[in-house]
Image: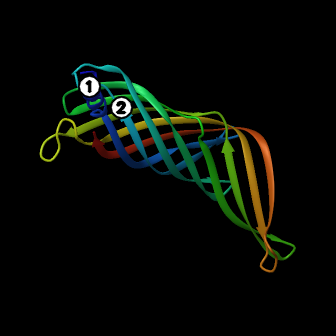
Amino acid sequence: MLVSLWIVSAQNAFAHVALTAGIGGVMGSIVKDEKPLKATGVAYGFALNWHPHFSGKPSFFSLGLTGKQMKLNYVENHINKRATYNLLGPSLGLFFPISETFIVQILGQYYPGANLSTLSTNSVQLNGSNFKYSTYELFTGPAAFEGRINFTTDKTDGQFNKKNRLRSGIGISFLQQQFAKEKVDISTSKDELTPTTTSTVSEVTHKTMIITIEYFLGLTF
C-alpha cells in the first residue's frame, strides 16, 4: 500500500516537470566607470522547471534551474568587442494557470557563478612598425540576478496529453550584475616576433543591465 502511494505521488510530481530550450535577442548596456556602453546580441539556453498540479489556482511555489549564454557586441573607445556572458543557477517564482493550457510564470533567477568575458583585436603604429594586439578581459563579482515573466501555451491534443505536453512561449527578462574584479590579458605581436602576453588584475565597479526577449520550446513530463 505504501509503495503504491509513493509511486502515484512520484508520478504526479514528475508530471509537472518541464524541460525547455530557448533563443532570443538581447539588448542593454555594460557600464564601465559610470560610462554605459550599448550592447546587443543573442542569448540561448535551457530551463528545467517544476510546478504544482494544474488546479486552476495560483501557486506561490515554482522551482527551476536555468543555464544561459549570451553573445554580445559593443564598442569601447572605437574598438569593436565581442563578449560572452555565462549564467547558471536556480530560480524560484510564482505559477499562474490562467487556463488548462495557458500559464503565466513570474520568476526570480539567481546566478552565483556568472562571468563576462570579452575579446578584441587591434593594431598600432610604433616607430614605423605595425604591432597587432588582442585583449581578453574577464569580469567577475557577486551573483547576477534576473527577473523574468513567461507567457506559456501548452498543446495537449494529438500525440500529446495533459501529462506529456508540448510547451512553448515567450519569456521577457531583465538581468543585472555588479562586477568587482577585472583580469586583462594583452597579447602583442609583430610579424617577425613571437607573441608576448601581459596580464593584470584590478578592482572595478562595472555592471551589466540586460533585457532579453526569448522564444522557448520544450516538453513536460
Q: Nearer the viewer, residue 144 or 164?
A: 164
Q: Whole-Å distance between the Cαs marked 1 and 2?
A: 10 Å
Mark 1, residue position? 53
Residue 133 position in % (x across, y down): 74, 66
Q: Quadrant of the N terminus?
A: top left
Q: Nearer the viewer, residue 143 or 12?
A: 12
**Could you tell me the amino acid type at mark 2?**
Trp
Q: Nearer the viewer, residue 164 or 185?
A: 164
What number of labels is visible?
A: 2
Mark 2, residue position? 50
Q: Specify whether 161 is left or right of 68.
A: left
Indicate the quadrant where residue 58 lies: top left
Q: Nearer the viewer, residue 130 or 56?
A: 56
Callout 2 crowding tier (Cα within 10 Å): few <14, some 14–19, many ≥20: many
- Asked which secondary structure carries label 1, the reply is loop
Residue 99 position in % (x across, y down): 19, 28
